[in-house]
Amino acid sequence: MKLLFIRHGDPDYSVDSLTEKGWREAAYLAERLARIDARAYYVSPLGRAKDTASLTMKAVGKTAVECEWLREFAPRIHRPDTPDGMQIAWDWLPQDWLGEERFFDHRRWYEPQAFAEAKVQAEYQWVTSQLDLLLAGYGYRREGDFYRVEQPNNDTILFFCHFGVTCVLLGHLLHVSPMVLWHGFCAAPTSVTTVITEERRKGIASFRVNAFGDISHLYAKGEPPAFAARFCECYDNEGERRD
């Protein structure tokens, strides 16, 4: 079984849609995804994800199922450097999160005070339980830390969603703290992350990443990746986001 997690195109957050560049990216993505024999398509309820998916759905003549749990993972917290304001849960300064050992533990990363106050654990459990419920419908039922294979298959399932929630889902599948993924990896707009099952013993499956943040469809068209989700490579670089 293959799961493809697709980030939306270059976003215009002010209207929850795509920029002109984002629409081009979505068109190139659609050309790529239309060649995949997918069993099902799922999409976030947010406009930027639905707009991205719309071009692929038009190309394949199908409809994506809208799932509330695929929306961006967005609990708001009091981050240490901005105690009087609210920040998205997964955007921390390195000097603030790297010193907390629990952030590296996939069973304890949501325990620190800022996350406990924002009930991040409850949001995480809801999102990941919904993924497990969906996978059970395709024959892979979670049992402890692995998946019991009840109906083995080579199906491909596509999810049009967001960077933050993708890292949450990957963390669940791979037993990795989302904090490590949020801050150690970057998926550009319209990138494709592929996760595959491995059944080394009959009836017992685990998931493994085959590709992360693949934007080969953009390179093939000479389209540079958008800067969204990144921060400045050097602090004095003009036009690159610092915070």
Image (cartoon, grey):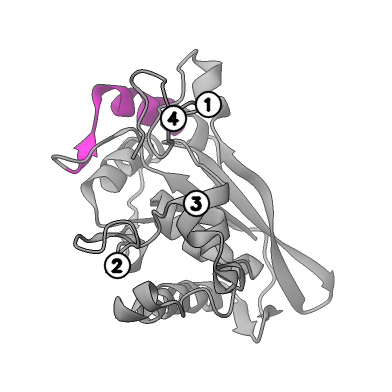
Q: Which sits earlier in the primary sequence, circle 4 or circle 2?
A: 2
Amino acid type, residue under disc 1 in the picture? His
Q: Which residue is mark 1?
A: 217
Taking the image as shown, residue 25 lies to the left or right of residue 95, namely left
Instruction: Please state which of the two labelled residues, at mark 3 or mark 2, is closer to the viewer.
Output: 3
The quadrant in which residue 72 appears is bottom left
Q: Are marks 1 and 2 in contact (CB under 8 Å)?
A: no
Q: Which residue is mark 4?
A: 232
Q: Which sits earlier in the primary sequence, circle 1 or circle 2?
A: 2
Amino acid type, residue under disc 4 in the picture? Cys
Residue 126 spot, x, y in % from top left: 38, 79
Q: Which residue is mark 3?
A: 94
Instruction: Name the one closer to the observer, 109 or 41.
Output: 109
What SS does tag 4 mark?
A: loop
Q: Mark 2: few, some, or many residues within 10 Å (few <14, many ≥20)?
A: some
Instruction: Please state which of the two labelled residues, at mark 1 or mark 3, is closer to the viewer.
Output: 3
Residue positioned most to the bottom: 144
What SS does tag 3 mark?
A: helix
Q: Quadrant of the N terminus?
A: bottom right
Q: Quadrant of the C terminus?
A: top left
What SS does tag 2 mark?
A: loop
Q: Which sits earlier in the primary sequence, circle 1 or circle 4?
A: 1
Q: Which residue is mark 2?
A: 75
Can residue 7 be seen here? The reply is yes
Taking the image as shown, residue 205 lies to the left or right of residue 130, namely right
The magenta region covers 16-30
Can residue 157 be seen here? The reply is no
Gap between marks 1 and 4, in whole Å? 24 Å
Q: Mark 1: few, some, or many residues within 10 Å (few <14, many ≥20)?
A: many
Q: Are marks 1 and 3 in contact (CB under 8 Å)?
A: no
* Residue 17 lies in the magenta stretch: yes
